[in-house]
Amino acid sequence: MKQLVSNGILYGIHWTGLMPVFRRLFAGRAVIVMFHEIQRDFQRELMTGTSVDLLQHCLVWLQRQGWKIVSLDECLRALSRNEPKAPRYAVITFDDGYRDLRSVALPLLEQNKTPFVLYVPTGAPTRALNSWWLGLREIFRRADHVTIDPMGTKFECSDFHSKKAGLKAVTQWVHQDYRRAALLKPTFDRYAVSLSALNAAYFLDERELQALSRHPLASIGGHTTSHAALAMLDPSAARAELVDNRRYLETLLELPVRHLAYPYGTAGACGPREERLAEQAGFSTGVTTRKGHLGDGSLNPFGLPRIGVGCHLESQRSFEANASGVQVAAHALMKAVSPLQCATGH
Ligand SMILES: [Zn+2]
């Protein structure tokens, strides 16, 4: 229902040309945009990242619509000044440390003079990461019959659409309980999928990360040691994930690391406890994957919202609507209609 209302509003305002009006009413003062992989051939990767064309569209669209793309530090400084006639700001972020940031996205970022933050878990450059999402994608790419034993499900997937749907189903199953990621190891072994080999193929190595950290547009942020959902861990383990990752990156890069992205970033993966731990670990900011905009006045630097960009064709319109505050409007509308639902429901 919520999705229907949101989509209905989205398409309605697109076709009626009301996007600029929505932006004035609902968009905040700033938006932090989240990307993961930037792919030239996103069909081959079962549409799990963002196409390079969509990245280009987002950068150009933001600038044309009057957003000023700045670094995270500059954005927060500007918001704290609370200037009445300041422009809207946008911050570009990439999670996980994929190599395609350097090989595919960087030329576009340079062309558009776009500062960016790259959030890196220690396990990516050290190749120790339990990158279960890459392992699952590899299985569905290679096999036409996929059995996920811990899920108790078999997938017949000989064509692109069934492979994409199967991958999506298993991914959602893990997202329902992040501890399930650890149950997939026998499945990877059975399909002879090496996560360390995938890590080496897809993630920047230490030398590449050192070089990128010297780029004038780049900031490197933490993303924990093992990419764990911190809320699932006891306090000392969660603290170690943050402290060790920051220390690792600062030693490797010989630079201060002050920004953090919480792995998965949902309300179930990080909350007030993780925000306190991040501050105690020496970070200055923490971004989530909770959708929203940054407003005027006081904001919580350890619980910053972001809007994510997918790769589907609708993502172009969806990104424009989200950046313009349509989700805020949909949420307000849902709140308004929910008492009616309660009155007529069981
Ligand atoms: Zn991540």
Image (tube, grey):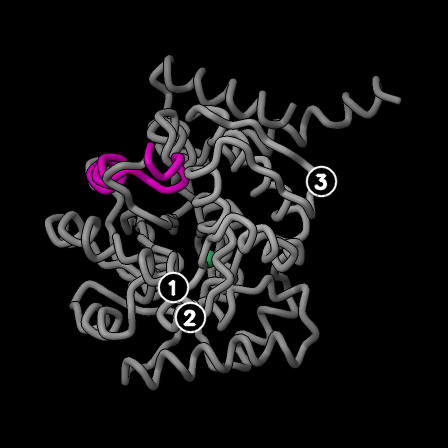
Between 277 and 202, which is closer to the camera in this rendering?
202
Between 296 and 148, which is closer to the camera in this rendering?
148
**Which numbered dot is residue 193?**
none
| Label 1 CA crowd tier, 10 Å (few <14, some 14–19, many 20+) | many
Is 60 magenta? The answer is yes
Q: Position of residue 291 (x, y in %)?
A: 51, 45
- What residue is rendered at 31% in x and 36% in y? 42
Between 186 and 276, which is closer to the camera in this rendering?
186
**Is residue 268 visible to the viewer in this orientation of the structure?**
no
Label 2 SS = strand
Disc 1 target residue: 119
Contact? badges 3 and 2 (CB < 8 Å): no
- What residue is rendered at 56% in x and 27% in y? 156
Answer yes or no: disc 1 within 8 Å of ligand 1.
yes
Answer yes or no: disc 2 within 8 Å of ligand 1.
no
Disc 2 target residue: 222
Work out how far the residue at label 3 is from the one at label 2, CA to CA, in angstroms.
35 Å
Sequence-first disc among 3 and 1: 1
Q: What residue range appears in magenta?
A: 43-62
Q: Position of residue 265 (x, y in %)?
A: 54, 56
Contact? badges 2 and 1 (CB < 8 Å): yes
Label 1 SS = strand
Looking at this view, name the residue that lies furthest to the top. 16
Q: Nearer the viewer, mark 3 or mark 1?
A: 3
| Label 3 CA crowd tier, 10 Å (few <14, some 14–19, many 20+) | few
Q: Nearer the viewer, mark 3 or mark 2?
A: 3
Work out how far the residue at label 3 is from the one at label 1, CA to CA, in angstroms.
34 Å
**Which numbered dot is residue 152?**
3
On the rendered structure, is 257 left or right of 281? left
Tell me if residue 19 comes above or below residue 44 in the rendering.
above
Which amino acid is tagged 2? Gly
Which amino acid is tagged 3? Gly
